[in-house]
């Protein structure tokens, strides 16, 4: 029957495709199933910038150091178009104007770049590279090996255990400890043992696009989503010790959200809305008045015109206005939005300026709704005449 298979591979990423190819080479009737509309997984190619569709990038296969040479030979990948193009350097920028480039083959330049943040880390980096290379020399060949059946006394299994022991002969007591640390420690703890500068230790990406870092600590990373990324998104954290697991989520073109107060006490969680009359935050004791002009401090208003690169302060001339203009209503009464866009001089912070009509409803908890592109956020405010 047409739907009878010897092997079914779930997932058409690069691992699934390679597994399916090897199974088929051995004569198995094989099918590879993929939920998306294309195969390739982390090695697929996409055009993440709608305004520049001719620029194509791969999702994650920016390095090929783990591609075993025997797979290239067995599947004749070079005959089918496989070719590695050397790229570099790695580049990361931060909102304060600093940046770092790391070169794959220029230790002197790397020292100069890292020294801008930490001379100690600059001196440590060659030792780190040598340490990783030493561990990789021992562990690399094991990637394509079937783990031995440790504890088995069958002659064939004992021979495989001896072969593994022979391969590991390059590890002394220190090397064995290093391998154990590499596999049992968190990446954060491992990097903390080696480096002191957070700029050296972390880089966050969304769909392969670097995310500007706004704050980095051992427990928290704040970054700004690139304006030109929406739809299905994959986030990962890149460090000198490796790459984190992927975190998949959706980015909407616009999803307004109003900042709230984080201060302790009775004003905790209040919306960050200010009255133009006194430039004070709206609270029960400083309510919105009819005919007020209010400023709503928000995030998530999406792309602007003119477009602004993520991580850079917004300009004051011209103002970076939201492409999708939000609407604001108070208790069902529409407010006149006079400006919605990025705050000049700030990174990723939006403001919505709106005037309150004289017929606005009064009350202690009047719903204020911001709607943009089909997404909305609602909160309650006090309104008086």
Image: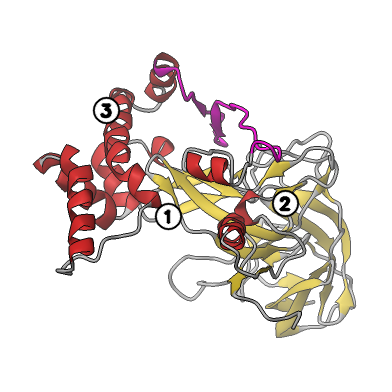
Question: From where the camera sits, is residue 5 visible?
Answer: yes
Which label number is shown at residue 127?
3
Is residue 104 one of those drawn in magenta?
yes
State which quarter of the image contains the C terminus: bottom right
Is residue 101 one of those drawn in magenta?
yes
Q: Which residues are magenta?
A: 78-107
- Horizontal relation, residue 11 to residue 176: left or right: right
Tag 2 residue = 229
Of the residues under marks 1 and 3, which one precedes in the sequence?
A: 3
The dominant secondary structure in magenta is loop
Tag 1 residue = 220
Where, by quadrant of the figure, is residue 140 drawn?
Answer: top left
Q: What whole-number distance in Å separates the C-alpha atoms at marks 2 and 3?
A: 37 Å
Relative depth, front residue between 157 and 96: 157
Return the x and y of residue 305 as percentages of the image width and height: 85, 44
Relative depth, front residue between 361 and 380: 380
- Horizontal relation, residue 241 to residue 362: left or right: left
Q: What whole-number distance in Å separates the C-alpha atoms at marks 1 and 3?
A: 27 Å
Q: What whole-number distance in Å separates the C-alpha atoms at marks 1 and 2?
A: 22 Å
Of the residues under marks 2 and 3, which one precedes in the sequence?
A: 3
Return the x and y of residue 142 as percentages of the image width and height: 33, 49
Q: Nearer the viewer, mark 1 or mark 3?
A: 3
Where, by quadrant of the figure, is residue 292 drawn?
Answer: bottom right
């Amino acid at each position: 029957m047409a739907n009878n298979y010897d092997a079914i591979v779930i997932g058409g990423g690069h691992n699934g495709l390679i597994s399916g190819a090897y199974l088929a080479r051995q004569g198995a009737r094989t099918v590879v199933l993929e939920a998306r509309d294309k195969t390739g997984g982390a090695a697929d190619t996409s055009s993440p910038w709608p305004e520049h569709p001719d620029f194509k990038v791969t999702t994650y296969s920016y390095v090929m150091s783990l591609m075993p040479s025997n797979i290239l030979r067995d599947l004749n990948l070079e005959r089918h178009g496989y070719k590695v193009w050397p790229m570099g350097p790695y580049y990361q920028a931060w909102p304060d104007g600093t940046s770092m480039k790391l070169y794959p083959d220029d230790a002197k330049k790397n020292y100069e770049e890292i020294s801008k943040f930490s001379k100690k880390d600059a001196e440590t980096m060659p030792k780190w590279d040598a340490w990783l290379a030493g561990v990789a020399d021992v562990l690399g060949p094991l990637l394509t090996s079937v783990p031995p059946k440790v504890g088995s006394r069958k002659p064939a299994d004992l021979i495989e255990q001896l072969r593994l022991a022979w391969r590991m002969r390059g590890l002394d007591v220190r090397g064995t400890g290093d391998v154990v640390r590499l596999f049992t420690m968190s990446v954060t703890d491992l990097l903390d043992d080696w480096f002191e500068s957070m700029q050296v230790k972390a880089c966050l990406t969304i769909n392969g696009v670097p995310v500007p870092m706004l704050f980095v600590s051992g427990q928290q990373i704040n970054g700004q989503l690139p304006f030109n990324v929406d739809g299905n998104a994959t986030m990962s954290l890149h460090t000198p010790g490796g790459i984190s697991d992927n975190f998949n989520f959706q980015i909407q073109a616009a999803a307004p959200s109003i900042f709230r107060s984080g201060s302790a006490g009775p004003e905790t969680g209040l919306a960050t809305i200010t009255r133009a009359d006194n430039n004070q935050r709206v609270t029960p004791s400083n309510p919105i008045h009819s005919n007020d002009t209010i400023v709503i401090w928000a995030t998530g208003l999406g792309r602007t015109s003119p477009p602004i690169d993520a991580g850079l302060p917004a300009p004051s001339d011209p103002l970076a206005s939201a492409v999708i203009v939000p609407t604001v209503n108070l208790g069902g009464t529409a407010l006149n939005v006079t400006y919605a866009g990025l705050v000049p001089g700030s990174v990723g912070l939006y403001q919505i300026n709106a005037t309150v009509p004289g017929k606005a409803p009064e009350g202690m908890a009047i719903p204020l709704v911001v709607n943009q592109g089909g997404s909305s956020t609602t909160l309650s405010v006090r309104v008086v005449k």
